[in-house]
Amino acid sequence: MTVKDFPEECWESVFRFLGLGHRHLNGHREGLLRQISQSGLELDLINLSNQRTFPVDGLRELGSNKKKLTVLICSNIGSLRDSHLVIIAYCFPLLDKLDISFPLNSQASDFGVLRLSSMLENLRKINISGNHLITDKSLFSLCQNCLSLEEISFFICFKITQTGIASAIRLRPGLSSIAFNIEKKRIHGPGLTLTPIDLNLIDSFRTLKRLTDIDLSNSVISDEFLFAVAEGAGLLLKKLILQDCCNCTFSGISYVLSKCQSVQCLDLRKVDFLSDQCISKLSVFLLSLTTINLSGCCQLTNSTFFILTRNCPLHSQKVIALVVPLNK
């Protein structure tokens, strides 16, 4: 029996198995990819996450017969190089979603991202988080060359500056989702104050009129920054992640929620100034809320749970996924 004789159900099982991230398959992954490339099925997605090595030969073989692949996930790969990015772009020119986040050893640079972006015109979603060598040039090239780009994530890419982010946003104001963190660096001076938010970055967020999701986990932000997010996104915003953010106040959070009352998913973990009274005031804006995470907010008590279940109207239709400390 040849690979072409395999029934479709058998191949479906293989594809599901590939997506489970089995590290012990590294030695056989290349051969398995070659066999898949010879099958008659059209692949839309393949997940190669959690592998010790990047399967260069297997992907080349796969790309020779499966150029219609639209989603490639290579998160937590052992090593990622510029040459790997070129191979991805060459083999799968129709990709619209690519995840190359958090390689264990990232050697990918602006050169590789520039080549990638110039070859993937249809790319809509990309996650480059954890590739610490890339700079503003990478972000700029993605926003300039990928004309369909809607979603981008770049956590722990601290060579990307606030100025670079602002410039990229102005190139691509149609972004619907953005996820990144502004490093909590301190500058010398009275009280070792946190690095301020660039005014150009604040202004750029006012141009994001289609923004539905924003994740700023573990960032230094400001009330002015939150004001700009609210003014840009307005009622389109569905997901707001401010986990472990610092340098903002209740006024900033209250303002953004008052202007963005369509928020369904809200994450305020470790926002330690929140009290039961704060949650009571915020709850009047949470008309569409279905999920909220308040873990690590040490001032909250059981009262917060009752406030939210009483005041959020969708609770009568859906169960709110609520994570709050209930130890008081």
Image: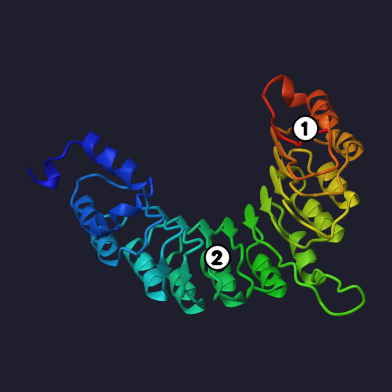
Position of residue 85 measured from the top left corner of the image (x, y, whole percent): 41, 69
For the residues carrying marks 1 and 2, which lies nearer the camera in this image?
Answer: 1
Q: What number is the disc on residue 130? A: 2
Asked which quadrant contains residue 287, the reply is: top right
Position of residue 203 measured from the top left corner of the image (x, y, whole percent): 79, 65
The single residue placed furthest to the left in the displayed view is 1
Rendered position, 298 above or below 143: above
Q: Is residue 61 left or right of residue 111?
A: left
Location of the C terminus (image quadrant): top right
The single residue placed furthest to the front in the displayed view is 327
Q: Is residue 171 left or right of residue 125?
A: right
Q: Which one is in front, 226 or 205?
A: 226
Rendered position, 54 above or below 271: below
Position of residue 297 measured from the top left corner of the image (x, y, whole percent): 79, 44
Residue 175 visible, this angle: no
- Read off the residue under disc 1: 326
Q: Is residue 48 left or right of residue 222?
A: left
- Name the secondary structure under disc 2: loop
Asked which quadrant contains residue 50, the reply is: bottom left
- Name the secondary structure under disc 1: loop
Q: Residue at x 59, y 59 (%)?
A: 153
Q: Residue at x 67, y 25 (%)?
A: 319
Q: Amino acid at mark 1?
A: Leu
Position of residue 222 measured from the top left corner of the image (x, y, whole percent): 83, 60
Q: Earlier in the sequence, mark 1 or mark 2?
A: 2
Location of the N terminus (image quadrant): top left
10 Å neighbourhood of mark 2: few (<14), some, or many (≥20)? many
Q: Amino acid at mark 2?
A: Gly
Q: Residue at x 69, y 55 (%)?
A: 217
Q: Is residue 323 left or right of residue 47?
A: right
Q: Residue at x 68, y 62 (%)?
A: 181
